[in-house]
Image (cartoon, rainbow, N blue to C red):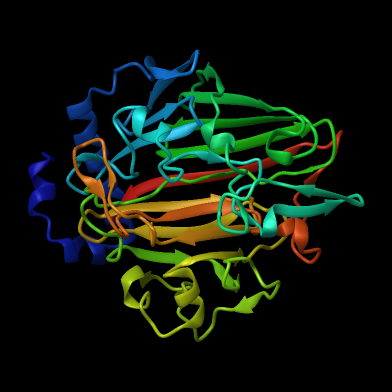
């Protein structure tokens, strides 16, 4: 069937179609995409992307047999773009990013980056570990955010391409010296991006340390499934598999409570349009200027791989399913995006992107009741998040 079928297919019919029909629709979309993008193209390519001081930055492009494409640079182990088809087979990037290295170096807020050594906030940039107090840089008011002033997002990682029958993969490694940004122990961190031929992007995190240290790695991609960075994410529909969340204080630090989402604007257990309650008279929404909170994922067992969220966008038909071994999901609704310049000549305005950061809870080193984030010598930090793409 030709791609013109998708231009004439009524959106309501696509939504109401039985599962078998939706599966067939996705197969037709992929076939249409492959005919346009020539699936025989190389699975991975590399080009120079600039310099940070005397260090070269490289940009890798991973593509699967259906034409889905992820571009990843070695600066910050960052997802620069992620192209998936809409229901008509048109490929667009569903994450916010830039065409050149310069905007990333200018200090944009973590677009697509791997954040660490500790993703999210640590109150007052301070924690006590084995009886010793450690002080981190304060780069978010009175707190340390995403690893400090020069976290993993601002470092050049070493890349190792991996080819396999399942699809191309890129392993990136960064060795964080003891004392870097105030953290103890030399940490060897690895993140592996794998784009599989069943239309999923897996992100595997791995780390070892020479001394006890907090570790919390996450990807900070800003999603916009419309493929148009000038449109907001308020019409996106989100489901989060969580019965509780961690409410915050005025500094966006968890209070320690695990609060039930039932009866609140934080209940996404059934799909909800993001804009439907974002301006509700809710103290937590006021403190976060919208959604900027950690959800406690419903898990059958600690570290179990399970469904975290499903994000969809009605006009394009794009769907992203998020599965993870992590205990938490930080949903950030782009409340502080304020017109940063984009690579296409546009700007990323208020709420034109949203983050679904799979991670451990914020400020865990200061909350004994939260799942531990302390890694010790001889142990291995290992987490997995999988993004699966489809249309409806």
Question: Image point 54% across, 83% down: which residue?
Answer: 262
Question: Image point 58% across, 47% down: which residue?
Answer: 146
Q: Report whether residue 227 is seen.
A: no
Residue 252 location, quadrant? bottom right
The residue at the far right in this view is 131
Towards the viewer: 321 or 139: 139
In the rendered structure, the answer to whether residue 200 lies left or right of residue 182 reads left
In the rendered structure, the answer to whether residue 22 lies left or right of residue 378 reads left
* Quadrant of the drawing holding the N terminus: top left
Q: Position of residue 19 (x, y in %)?
A: 33, 59
Towards the viewer: 1 or 278: 278
Q: Is residue 118 above or below residue 106?
A: below
Q: Position of residue 153 (x, y in %)?
A: 53, 36
Towards the viewer: 144 or 220: 144
Q: Position of residue 293 (x, y in %)?
A: 53, 66
Q: How many marks?
A: 0
In the rendered structure, the answer to whether residue 183 lies left or right of residue 88 reads right
Residue 274 location, quadrant? bottom left
Towards the viewer: 318 or 244: 244
Q: Position of residue 208 (x, y in %)?
A: 76, 32
Q: Report whether residue 208 is seen.
A: yes
In the rendered structure, the answer to whether residue 345 lies left or right of residue 349 reads left
* Quadrant of the drawing holding the C terminus: bottom left
């Amino acid at each position: 069937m030709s791609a013109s079928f998708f231009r004439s297919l009524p959106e309501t019919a696509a939504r109401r179609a039985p599962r078998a029909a939706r599966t067939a629709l996705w197969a037709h979309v992929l076939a249409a995409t492959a005919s346009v993008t020539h699936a025989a193209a190389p699975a991975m390519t590399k080009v120079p992307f600039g310099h940070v001081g005397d260090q070269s930055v490289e940009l890798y492009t991973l593509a699967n047999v259906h034409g889905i494409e992820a571009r990843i640079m070695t600066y910050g182990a960052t997802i620069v773009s992620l192209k998936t088809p809409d229901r008509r087979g048109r490929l667009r990037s569903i994450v916010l990013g830039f065409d050149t290295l310069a905007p990333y170096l200018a200090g944009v807020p973590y677009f697509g980056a791997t954040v660490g050594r500790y993703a999210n906030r640590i109150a007052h940039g301070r924690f006590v570990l084995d009886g010793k107090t450690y002080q981190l840089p304060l780069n978010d008011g009175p707190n340390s955010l995403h690893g400090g002033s020069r976290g993993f997002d601002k470092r050049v990682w070493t890349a190792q391409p991996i080819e396999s029958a399942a699809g191309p993969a890129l392993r990136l490694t960064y060795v964080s010296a003891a004392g870097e940004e105030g953290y103890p122990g030399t940490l060897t961190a690895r993140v592996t991006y794998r784009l599989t031929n069943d239309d999923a992007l897996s992100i595997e995190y791995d780390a070892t340390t020479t001394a006890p240290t907090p570790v919390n790695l996450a990807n900070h991609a800003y999603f916009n499934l419309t493929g148009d960075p000038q449109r907001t994410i308020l019409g996106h529909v989100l489901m989060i598999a969580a019965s509780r969340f961690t409410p915050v204080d005025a500094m966006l630090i968890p209070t320690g409570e695990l609060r039930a989402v039932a009866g609140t604007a934080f209940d996404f257990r059934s799909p909800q349009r993001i804009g439907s309650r974002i301006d509700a008279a809710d103290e937590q929404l006021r403190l976060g200027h919208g959604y900027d909170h950690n959800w406690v994922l419903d898990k059958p067992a600690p570290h179990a791989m399970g469904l975290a969220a499903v994000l969809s966008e009605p006009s394009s038909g794009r769907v992203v399913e998020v599965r993870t071994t992590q205990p938490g999901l930080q949903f950030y609704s782009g409340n502080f995006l304020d017109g940063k310049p984009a690579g296409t000549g546009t700007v990323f305005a208020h709420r034109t992107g949203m983050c679904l950061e799979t991670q451990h809870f914020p400020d865990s080193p200061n909350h004994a009741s939260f799942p531990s984030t302390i890694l010790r010598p001889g142990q291995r930090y290992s987490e997995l998040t999988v993004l699966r793409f489809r249309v409806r």
